[in-house]
Amino acid sequence: MRSKLSKSSVKEVIFQAFYECRLQTFALFQDMDEATFCSQPHPDFSPVGWHLGHIAYIESLWLLERSAGSPCLFPQYRKLFAADGLPKSERVHLPNLEEIRYYLDTVREKVLEYLEVADIEQQERLWHFLIQHESQHCEIISFVLELNKRQEAEFVTLHVPPSSTPFTEMIQIPAGEFEQGSDSIDALDNERPAHRVYLDTYLIDRYPVTCGQYREFIEAGGYQNSQWWSELGWQWLQKESVSQPLYWCSDAYGGKLRSYDNHPVCGVSWYEAEAYSRFVGKRLPTEAEWEKAVSWDAQTNSHRTYPWGDEKPTVQQCNCVGVAHRRHRLIGKTTAVNAYPAGQSTYGLYDTLGNVWEWTDSWFDGYKGFQSYPYTGYSQVYFDHQHRVLKGGSWATRSWVLRSSFRNWYHPGVRQLFAGFRCAADEKHHPQGGGE
């Protein structure tokens, strides 16, 4: 379908995506005060204002300087907004929002002028990369804003009755090959190349693990019992001294007190996900197991871009920041794991795209035949056996990075992103943990 579009049509699609994406970006900064703009609520993440300036810096670097051959428009910002320019702790000294808005607007005006004359057949992949780059940084902005918010308010844990729906059903995925990855024009380097993978029969949860289910782990002393934790996980727990997920069932979104028991657990590290899986006698799915259950259509022997098919996401299919929303929700929220029946995969999995990212058991690495693009530092430097793969996206993920083949990656101890998980098991599964 994409290959049949004319050059002018491709440029129109890109123009519209750039426009929609930037509207959503600026919506995040409406009525933002200077303290929030420049503050660093966690040492591992830069201030939201830095991410905004970095978006303009990368767009200018790749499209104006390296593609169009133009001189740097704002050389004074090169060190400040380059990813390797300053330590995160020194990125708090920023121009104000108005100045950075001017930076973005000036760069974007020149970029759109260049789009009119750009060799889009040669550059289309780069333009798609930059839309996704902005989208990814805006998701970081979303959870840094949430971290800021949590520092400013006191949160009360809710004790609510368990949900009447258990959400414990597992689905059997039969043995066989499927196609993992993607060769589409918008696929990032770590998604390529598409390749065939054989998997034995396995079971996977129909729904992500809910807050109600995870509460059983907490109330059973899961955070105090080393039995459920790996050696590294237990070391992490002793260091962090946590006793519940970061975004636990609380009045964290400023609304009325209500039950989140049927929402996915959110704000857990990989170690916490692993411990819960052991507690219920299961395990985390591998990346391939997750992707097959979400994207494979066994009847047509074909890979689906999304669980429901190849039509772009809408608010009827998943909880995300998409073009159908028209504007970004500054402070979003999770939704019930069974809220989007139209978004099921062919195997019947719910809630696989949007809502919360899902940890997998796989280390982040390149597929056979991997080629870095547009630079080594985007993916390849993270093939270090130190980062676990996450799949699916969250409520703060934009539609341009929301697809079954998309791969996210973080250190297993990170819990600041909007992440949860679902469990898997081998074919002969006999629950033996404390949660079932």
Image (cartoon, rainbow, N blue to C red):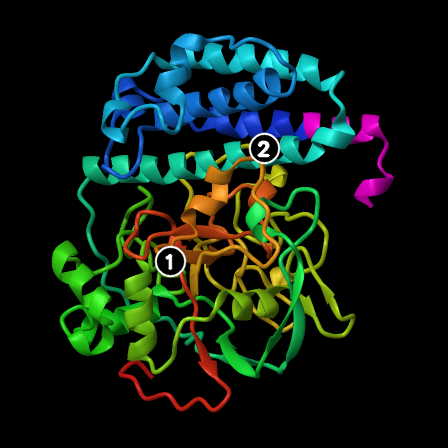
Q: Quadrant of residue 67?
A: top right
Please, is residue 134 above or below residue 419 in the view?
A: above
Q: Earlier in the sequence, mark 2 or mark 1?
A: 2
Rate crowding at label 2 as few (under 14), some (14 to 19) or many (20 or more) other CA atoms within 10 Å. Answer: many
Which residue type does callout 1 highlight?
His
Q: Is residue 329 above or below residue 218?
A: above
Is residue 116 left or right of 344 when viewed as pictured? Answer: right
Which residue is at the front of the view, 15 or 84? Answer: 84
Whether pointer 2 and pointer 1 mark residues with C-beta atoms closer than 8 Å, the reply is no
What residue does disc 1 label? 385
Q: On the rendered image, what quadrant is the C terminus found in?
A: bottom left
Give whichever of 114, 341 is nearer the camera: 114
Q: Dividing the picture into quarters, in which one does residue 350 lie?
A: bottom right
Q: Nearer the viewer, residue 324 or 95?
A: 95
On the question of residue 89 being in view, the answer is yes
Q: Secondary structure at mark 1?
A: loop
Q: Is residue 380 magenta?
A: no
Residue 22, above or below 404: above
Q: Position of residue 235 (x, y in %)?
A: 16, 63
Query: In the picture provided, is 310 more to the left or to the right than 411?
Result: right
The magenta stretch spans which residues?
Answer: 1-15
Question: Which residue does the numbered mark 2 point to in the structure image?
Answer: 131
Instruction: Kindly state the secondary structure of the residue where label 2 is placed.
Output: helix
Report, in whole angstroms, how far the alpha carbon at label 2 lies from the one at label 1.
28 Å
* Label drawn at residue 244: none
